Image (cartoon, rainbow, N blue to C red):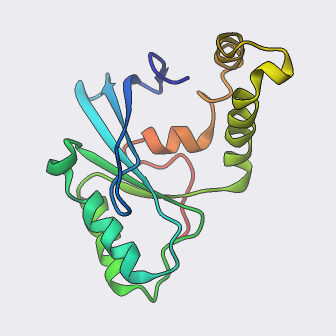
Amino acid sequence: MLKGETIENISISEISTFNASSHDLHFSISTFDSQSQKDVKIGIRVCETTNGLSFNAVMKRLLDYEKYGINRGCLIRSTPIPKSWRRGKELETQLKHQGGEVVVLKKEEIKPLIAIYKIYQQSEDYGFQKNELIQLIKEMEIVKQNPLIREILSEGTTVHQNAD
């Protein structure tokens, strides 16, 4: 639903999924930043682990920009990285130095996206064809105006503050 859209000077040209193993990226977003006049490819990984070693493995893969052909990384979690995860905090700092960020989900921002996903999956049950639903969502700018989506696309200058 975002392909072809422009959000705050970021034009989204492609969204690709990875055939991910347990610690690889989930997907990437290819964009053009009209403000800085450069192509940006953001690698995205969701990581909910409560195990520091697993988290570190995920972060090390995310930081390997060359392997994935990305130039910005984004890790998404529902909770901040625990302060007790010294190595995890170091990897987060390294990610920030490489232009990436850790985005902490906020329930009110993810709820509309989950609802859209559920309705999209069952669109025919609701009397919609999938393309009609996509058009409606685009017209209402539900996804385009979502703070979580805007944060993922931002260049580390946060739309909302993440808890550290």
Q: Residue furthest left?
A: 66
- The residue at 56%/68% (across/down) is 163
- Residue 108's spot in the image, x, y percent? 74, 50
Q: In the picture, which quadrant includes the N terminus? A: top right
Q: Is residue 43 left or right of residue 102?
A: left
- Residue 7's spot in the image, x, y percent? 49, 26
- Residue 56's spot in the image, x, y percent? 33, 75
Residue 146, relative to residue 126: is it above or below?
below
- The residue at 39%/56% (across/down) is 101
- The residue at 16%/50% (across/down) is 67
- The residue at 76%/30% (across/down) is 119
Report how many numbered discs are placed on residues in the image.
Answer: 0
- Residue 82's spot in the image, x, y percent? 50, 81
Q: Nearer the viewer, residue 116 or 8?
A: 116
Q: Quadrant of residue 155?
A: top left
Q: Residue furthest right?
A: 126
Q: Nearer the viewer, residue 87 or 56?
A: 56
Residue 45, relative to residue 155: is it above or below?
below
Q: Residue furthest bottom?
A: 84
Residue 71, relative to residue 102: is it above or below?
above
Q: Quadrant of residue 92?
A: bottom left
Residue 22, relative to residue 130: is it above or below?
below
Q: Nearer the viewer, residue 154 or 31?
A: 31
Q: Is residue 48 left or right of residue 139?
A: left
